[in-house]
Image (tube, rainbow, N blue to C red):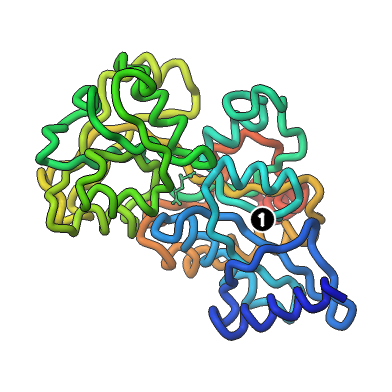
Amino acid sequence: MKKVIALGVVLIFGFALLAGCGGEEKQAAAPQQPAKASTTFVTIGTGGITGVYYPTGGAIAKIVNQKKDQYHIRCTVESTGGSVFNVNAIMAGDLQFGVVQSDRQYQATKGLAEWADKGPQADLRAVFSIHPESVTLVAAVDAGINAIQDLRGKRVNIGNPGSGQRQNAIDALEAVGIDYNTDMNAESIKAAEAPGLLQDGRIDAFFYTVGHPSGAIKEATAGARKVRFASITGIDALLEKFPYYAKSIIPATLYPGAEGGADVQTFGVKATFVTSAKVPENVVYAVTKEVFDNFDAFKSLHPAYAVLTKEGMLEGMSAPIHPGAMKYYKEAGMK
Ligand code: GLU
């Protein structure tokens, strides 16, 4: 009975609040089949609401929900702590899909980093990849930070433990010889809270691995305290060591409030869309087909998708491709 009530709440929530784009209602384990309608409920794990993952989950849900009469799938979106949280929640069956950094997909698949103790996440499955993300270091001008090397002795948010960016920050700091435990005051706060803390003078800088433009970076660059993007260079050994890192540039023109104005050099990864081997083939097939068949409509839903190509969306995956996604790629002649 409780489950039926809970599903009713999800329905009302979905209709009333987001007109089919999904809400933040948490779902139970595997896709649910309520007694009356044969609707399958799936939840997409994203990130903070001012990032790009949250609107990305919304974009995918919107496109899939348009065909609810055909597929009987209802997608909802949940704001989460980010990539690492999403992988773990998908593996636990609490979420069916999630947006996850390509480096985190690789580490989870191979049993590295946060998964070193738990081992390879054998049920993790890739669906497609999405927009590029840059490791973005936003710093207060009055803190005298121009480059990552200037973070010594500063108060810096490296990210919450469930986030993707935390390990990127640690890797980059290590690469330039800064120990985040001893050489600076590291904070472990969610990215959505960092812009406010920077503007309030409670931190000097923060890391966020995110697509551009994003609401969080707009917020950070639009306040009274002047901020700039600090460069992350001198990390060639890091880029050589890890196959998932590549050089990237933050186009400063996207943020007129930021000081400097020139493009900033850093490195980055890709956002990817993942699921579990336990999610049924027909569900993953429908989601994949709708995103690719409506590629132009999908691409128009966020400016960070400007660079997307269908072929590019099959790059950057390291987990096995889910059979439902593969079925579509074969049908479409893409694999
Ligand atoms: N890359 C971040 C993470 O994995 C999330 C970025 C976003 O929400 O756009 O935690």
Q: Residue at x 73, y 71 (%)?
A: 73
Rendered view: 133 above or below 265: below
Rendered view: 30 above or below 158: below
Residue 88 position within the rendered picture, expressed as x and y whole percent measured from the top left: 66, 42
Rendered view: 293 above or below 187: below
Residue 213 position within the rendered picture, expressed as x and y whole percent measured from the top left: 31, 55
Q: Is residue 80 left or right of residue 117?
A: left
From the viewer's side, name the closer residue of 335 and 91: 91
The local secondary structure at tag 1 comes to: loop
Q: Is residue 157 left or right of residue 19?
A: left
Location of mark 1 (residue): 332
Q: Is residue 12 left or right of residue 28?
A: left
Within 10 Å of disc 1 (Cα), the crowding (few <14, some 14-19, many 20+) is: few
From the viewer's side, name the closer residue of 171 and 288: 171
Q: Residue at x 58, y 61 (%)?
A: 78
Q: Residue at x 66, y 54 (%)?
A: 97
Residue 161 position within the rendered picture, expressed as x and y whole percent measured from the top left: 51, 38
